[in-house]
Image (tube, grey):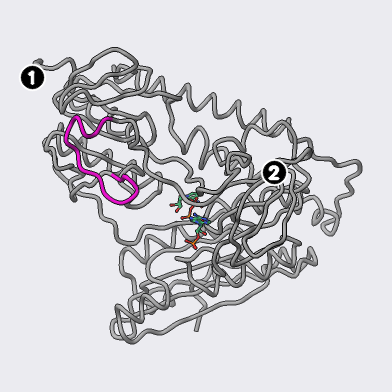
Amino acid sequence: MSRTYDYDLLVIGAGSGGVRAARIAAGHGAKVAVAEEYRVGGTCVIRGCVPKKLLVYGAHFAEDLVDAERFGWQLQGKAFDWPTLRDNVLAEVDRLNGLYKNTLASHEVTVIEGHARFVDAHRVDIGGKTVSAGHILIATGARPAVPDVEGAEHGITSNEIFHLDRLPKSMIIAGGGYIANEFAGVFHEFGTSVTLLNRSDKILREWEPALVDRLLTISLAKGLNFRFNCRLSRIEKTESGVRLHFVDGGTQDADQLLWATGRVPNTEGLGLEAAGVETGALGAILVDEANATNIKHIHAVGDVTNRVQLTPVAIREGHAFADSVFGNKPWRVDYRCIPSAVFSNPPLGSVGLTEAQARDECGSVRVYTSDFRPMKNVLAGRNERALYKLIVDASTDVVVGAHMIGPDAPEILQAVAIAVKAKLTKAQFDDTIALHPTMSEELVLMR
Ligand code: NDP
């Protein structure tokens, strides 16, 4: 590798995509540095997927402990202590942060702490120190988008939620996407009175509507509150929390306001203009299928490109970049059939086309549904039904979409995603003998 520059590769951002790219490029023999202004690990590890999933586990005990009595367990004096869970989760985040740092160190990747800003197309200022590199990978991720409304600063985002001093008695969550529904489920189980407030009349807009309706029905039955078609005029700070004022008059008070209104690429303050890197809507970095920007030695992966905001996609993009540029093994990420989950209560899992998308793309489709009450819910006296939906291209019999809501749906969905990605037919699903008694057996029993 050339030593014209300080490094062969400078990665800006030590999140999932950046760390994978750095490690793989170093494994191919490149001299690599990573610039990070906050903590190694990025959103997923530090303030996203990982701590969120641990809170989801923590929250689930609330219902499990109630159900346990129907299964013969007598539990006295059960109580939930938020600081215990919070501190254990944050300790786990610290542990993972350490592992990520070790991984970089063991691959001889230099971590440079500080905010990175392009000086020109090959040089970057990192906290006052200028570093040059032959290739630069921008992997700075995204940050929560907060609407431009008076008093917005009185709300918190998913960045702060893991650090709350105490559990709020009431919480308004603005937004109706992944983050809103996940935290709504979590805090409701902790005993907080949750209101999900959305600007339209739809939550989880991209998801199979039948599953979304089921989530809404179950959430309402559990006692979550929803306000649709809401426009905020301003947010006022009160002694106990916040007061939201609505455009059509009326107010609602809560101890806490959480913004869950999308995420925007982190490109502000990067000095992209000094390097000549082009950006598009929301400041996202424009890249081609090989993750290259308009400047040929500058690439970008992950949320900063605003393609698919999912950790495993960023990791794969980072890996493809490093293999292609430093390993002489060019390959591209296949964006078809990306499985996805919402860790709401109950959770949703999905892969492939929704029924409406399949009708557009395939023309004629067959739709199979299984609407059932999981065995555990029956004994627990819990009237919550799961819903599985398979979408089949009628002309080829290929299963083009699988959508599920119910206990462990994301765990089951990952396996189904292999079948859908492999273009297996409905006949092949049916030819597989059921594994009894499970919920997932429904997948091979839909007639
Ligand atoms: P989403 O894109 O999922 O949802 C954003 C929500 O906020 C929508 O309901 C949207 O309404 C609403 N909204 C957007 N802008 C405004 C505004 N200005 N005022 C009021 N409401 C607004 O975003 P999230 O923040 O929940 O998550 C960001 C991304 O992170 C997700 O898209 C996903 O890719 C990723 N993620 C993945 C997770 C997982 O894999 N389990 C978990 C968490 C995040 P409307 O529908 O009207 O546009």
Front-lying residue, 73 or 249: 249
Q: Left or right: where does residue 310 sit relative to residue 90?
A: left
Q: Position of residue 407 (x, y in %)?
A: 62, 60
Classify 10 Å Cα crowding around label 1: few (below 14), some (14-19), many (20 and above): few
As displayed, is residue 148 above or below residue 230?
above
Front-lying residue, 151 or 135: 151
In this view, the mark in front (2 or 1): 2
**Does residue 205 show up magenta in the picture?**
no
Residue depicted at x 37% and y 43%: 265
Check disc 2 and give the amino acid type. Gln
Check disc 1 and give the amino acid type. Ser
The residue singled out by tag 1 in the image is 2
**Does residue 281 show up magenta in the picture?**
yes
The residue singled out by tag 2 in the image is 256
Q: Position of residue 104 (x, y in %)?
A: 35, 22
Q: Position of residue 158 (x, y in %)?
A: 56, 41
The quarter in which the N terminus is drawn is: top left
Residue depicted at x 48% and y 34%: 45
Front-lying residue, 348 or 251: 251
Residue depicted at x 23% and y 47%: 286
Residue depicted at x 48% and y 74%: 444
Q: Left or right: where does residue 103 sit relative to residue 395?
A: right
Identify the disc placed on residue 385. none
The magenta segment is 271-284
> Could you tell me how many numbered marks the image carries?
2
As displayed, is residue 133 above or below residue 141?
above
